[in-house]
């Protein structure tokens, strides 16, 4: 089944979800390692990986949003309280917003710091801002706060999914599993 | 008799009296280098250098080219990189603040000229060939050219930086020097 329906996610939606989940966890690990690594060829390579995967996430997100907007989402269980629905919508909105904001702020840091960069060592990424140390420092701080926010929202997202499964015993988690159905 | 006269004329013409001394006009001169970083060209510039030339474009053989480069004036346009290149692993500003090129031989090569000589950079002496074009204009002249060095020949990039997959071995040197008779 490709398209989503009233109570299940189609294969493309699941693929986007789990592929991007894996990329985002790898991305956080790469970013933290790249920043803390001592200056060395390894550090430079870690940054190329981090920036490349960031751009990959941004591209995948564009496709994912198109798919999401041209497809209905399965309904939330009827017994969910209003605050739970609000929480679900707010956290999903935040996740999408952060999946845009993190690559874009990263792109600004990369441009403003004037370090030339090719995505996966092949496709040159154009600069979106002029070289400026102050801008690069400012956006590095913002990027750091955004990833902290992302970590908090991910804890809520995963916590809520587990609560749906083990406490409320509904299908919200199982219908997103690759092998799961509603 | 004719032969002797022309030979004498030749000797006189070849004499050093006709090879003019040239001084560099720093405002119109530029010494650039282009390294590679993660397969991207990264340009840099030595903001301070001086060129002294004794040269007659019609008889280059008696000439002499001396270039002194203030290595510590290197600027690669990225604050983090500029901080790094001053270290022992790279240019070693403290140990080797100056580089020097001294020609041993100047000759014509088709439409251009070649200065063969010794480049002393980071304390390492290496034979180098510097090709250049010569354009006279008004009372002055411009010499322009480029050639490629291997950073590894001069111990620029030590330790783990010796590997050339992250920072390439080849560094292109480009120069444009405005000269006036002095």
Image (cartoon, rainbow, N blue to C red):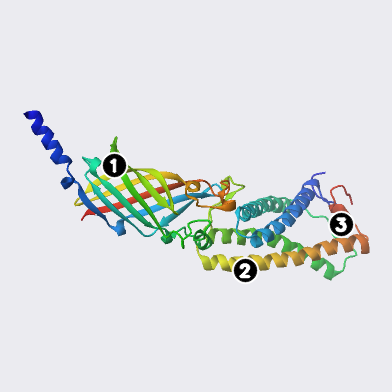
* Label 2, label 3: how far apart the Cα atoms are: 34 Å
- Categorize mark 2 by other alpha carbons within 10 Å: few (<14), some (14-19), many (20+): few
User: Hey, which residue is sitting farthest bottom in the picture?
Assistant: A83
> Which of the chains bears the disc numbered 3?
A
Name the secondary structure under disc 2.
Answer: helix
Give the residue at mark 2.
A141
Q: CA distance from mark 1 to mark 2?
A: 55 Å
A99 left or right, relative to B176: right
Residue A115 appears in the picture as rendered: yes
Q: Position of residue A157 (x, y in %)?
A: 80, 63
For mark 1, what is the residue? B106
Q: Which secondary structure, mark 1?
A: strand
Q: Which residue appears at 64% of the width and 65% of the height?
A: A143
Residue at 60% x, 53% y: name it.
A41
Question: Residues under labels 1 and 3: Cα distance?
Answer: 78 Å
Q: Chain of mark 2?
A: A
Give coordinates of residue B21: x percent, y percent: 21, 51
Query: With respect to residue B6, does B94 lie above or below?
Result: below
Label 3: element kind: loop
What's the mark number on residue A131? none
Q: Earlier in the sequence, mark 2 or mark 3?
A: 2
Indicate the position of residue B140 as horizontal and vertical percent values. 22, 52
Residue B110 pos. (x, y %)? 29, 34
């Amino acid at each position: 089944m490709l398209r989503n329906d009233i109570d299940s996610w189609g294969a493309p939606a699941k693929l986007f979800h789990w592929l991007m989940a894996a990329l985002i966890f790898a991305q956080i690990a790469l970013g933290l390692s790249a920043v803390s690594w001592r200056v060395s060829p390894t550090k430079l390579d870690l940054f190329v990986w981090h920036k490349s995967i960031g751009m990959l996430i941004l591209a995948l997100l564009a496709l994912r949003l198109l798919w999401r907007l041209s497809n209905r989402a399965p309904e939330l269980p009827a017994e969910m309280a209003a605050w739970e629905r609000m929480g679900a919508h707010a956290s999903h909105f935040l996740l999408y917003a952060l999946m845009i904001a993190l690559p874009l702020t990263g792109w600004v840091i990369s441009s403003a710091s004037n370090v030339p960069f090719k995505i996966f060592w092949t496709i040159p990424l154009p600069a979106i801002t002029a070289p400026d140390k102050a801008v690069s420092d400012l956006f590095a701080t913002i990027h750091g706060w955004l990833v902290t926010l992302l970590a908090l929202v991910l804890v809520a997202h995963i916590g809520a999914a587990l609560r749906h499964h083990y406490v409320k015993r509904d299908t919200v988690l199982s219908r997103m599993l690759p092998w799961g159905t509603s | 008799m004719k032969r002797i006269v022309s030979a004498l004329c030749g000797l006189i013409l070849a004499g050093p009296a006709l090879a003019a001394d040239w001084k560099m006009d720093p405002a119109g001169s530029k010494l650039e280098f282009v390294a590679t970083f993660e397969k991207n060209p990264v340009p840099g510039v030595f903001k301070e250098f001086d060129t002294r030339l004794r040269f007659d474009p019609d008889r280059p053989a008696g000439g002499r080219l001396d270039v002194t480069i203030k290595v510590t004036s290197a600027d690669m346009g990225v604050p983090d990189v500029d901080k790094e290149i001053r270290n022992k692993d790279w240019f070693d500003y403290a140990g080797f603040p100056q580089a020097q090129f001294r020609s041993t031989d100047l000759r014509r090569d088709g439409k251009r000229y070649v200065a063969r000589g010794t480049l002393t950079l980071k304390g390492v002496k290496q034979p180098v060939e510097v090709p250049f074009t010569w354009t006279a204009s008004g009372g002055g002249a411009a010499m322009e050219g480029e050639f490629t060095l291997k950073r590894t020949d001069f111990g620029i990039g030590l330790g783990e930086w010796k590997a050339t997959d992250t920072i390439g071995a080849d560094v292109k040197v480009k120069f444009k020097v405005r000269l006036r008779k002095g």
